[in-house]
Image (cartoon, helix red, strand yellow):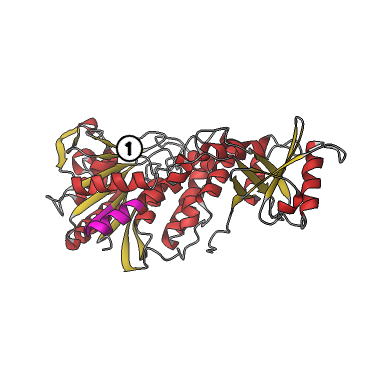
Amino acid sequence: MPPVFACVTPHPPILVPEVGRGRQHEVQDTVDAMVELQTGLAASQPDVLVFICPHGVVTRDRFHILRGELEGDLSRFEASEVRFRAQPDLELIDATLEEAKDRGVRIEAVDHWEPHDHSAWVPLYYLQEAVPDVPVMMISVSFGAPDDHYALGRVVAEVTSKLGRRVAIIASADGAHTLKEDGPYGFHPASLEFEERFHRAFRRWDLHEILNFETTFRMQAGEDSIPSVAFLMGALSHFEVEPRVLASEGPWGVGYMTAVVEIGDERGYGEPEPLAIDESPTIVRIAKAAVEAYVRDGKVLEDAPFAEGSLRDERHGAFVTILTASGELRGCIGTTEATEERLLDEVVRNAIAAASRDPRFDAVKANELDGLHYKVDVLGESEPIDSTAELDPRRYGVIVESGSLRGLLLPDLDGIDSAAEQVSIAMRKAGIRVSDEVHLQRFEVRRFEEHDAGKTN
């Protein structure tokens, strides 16, 4: 069953009359749009309200979901008489926790919500009146990547479909916060560009654009919308949609967009996305994310909530190869055996090394990132062999050892068609002379390559 209602709401406390005390009329278009959402929600008759909020219990490496009763008020804004209470849908919450665990999405249950979370209370003020006794499922964003939020949205889509819930999904989201010099966060020119690009991407339901806004640019704009909207897109990923912006204002230096998303026919859970989404394997997306986080922000990617269980449970050696847009090698570093407890961490470590410590190349610079492509080879167990007759350069990689010297060559490389050539190159890489006695090992790999956005295989 598809969600019966979906929307994006801003959350300035001044929208609430008891807080605004007349100033809410300065954003009357937004107020009118919230009332329109209220009417649409009442007509949809949902079983549960699913909220994604940017100011709940927010941490770096995981999401949080409320398993206790929702309680709060607007006392922080001198309107303590405005109070909120709602019961949780425990069956839906527990199913979401279980499904997220199975998919490697890190989410943790909490018993209490932030009592002054206006990103929850402002939309609730308008929407709860339409369905006063409907239970809620409250989820907070994390400081993780937009991909992580999209993955969590897909978890919710799967669970609500299995349980047959009539869900309404509310994505609480303010836009850029640096729109005016005299605004609460000052002015940055990135905010104007962000608002234009974000609104265009939302109207087109351009998932690739939403998931790939550059981190520093988002910080300069002070945006508060990408995570919630990425979650919403994940939750609606199996349905035809028609987004409709009802209001867009920013008189106080913060962008407010109010929108409804009309939900159409189901596309099916097994069908590929017809949107411009990166369909690359998760392991390659992790390598790419690790390089970009390190090069742009100097940070080591410590986790990827969208990573599936095998990346957390298995240990393997792995090579990360970085290529230019024209296919030229830009860096390649790897490990023949596992050095980390998780394959996930092995890939992150080697991706950063390939970008920054390959002695054949200068370190990758930020202005190169958009043109780079990635491959990841996960190595199987190596086994000793007696001669090149047991090699197939298309199927097996080779390890050549002579004393303390050790050379490795991956399989299925362009231009290498014979086992003898494969061994010869591996020996040259290690500095092993032709006259030296050598020992050979072979191994198989699982190769994962980056796909172009929008391409499916």
Residue 305 can be seen, yes or no: yes
Q: Position of residue 379 (x, y in %)?
A: 60, 45
Q: Nearer the viewer, residue 12 or 305?
A: 305
Q: Up-down: is 93 above or below 186?
A: below
Q: Residue at x 22, y 60 (%)?
A: 164
Q: Nearer the viewer, residue 176 or 291?
A: 291
Left or right placement of residue 250 versus residue 189 in this view? left
Residue placed under numbered mark 1 in the picture: 55
Q: Position of residue 159 (x, y in %)?
A: 28, 54
Q: Up-down: is 275 above or below 51?
A: below
Q: Is residue 161 magenta?
A: yes
Q: Is residue 327 magenta?
A: no
Which element carries disc 1, helix, strand or loop? loop
Q: Residue at x 24, y 31 (%)?
A: 76
Q: Position of residue 5 (x, y in %)?
A: 26, 59
Q: Residue at x 20, y 48 (%)?
A: 91
**Image quadrant in which you'd find residue 316:** top right
Left or right placement of residue 193 versus residue 389 in this view? left
Q: Position of residue 22 (x, y in %)?
A: 22, 43
Residue 173 can be seen, yes or no: no
**Image quadrant in which you'd find residue 366:** top right
- First to last magenta residue range: 155-169
Quadrant of the snapshot with the C terminus? bottom right
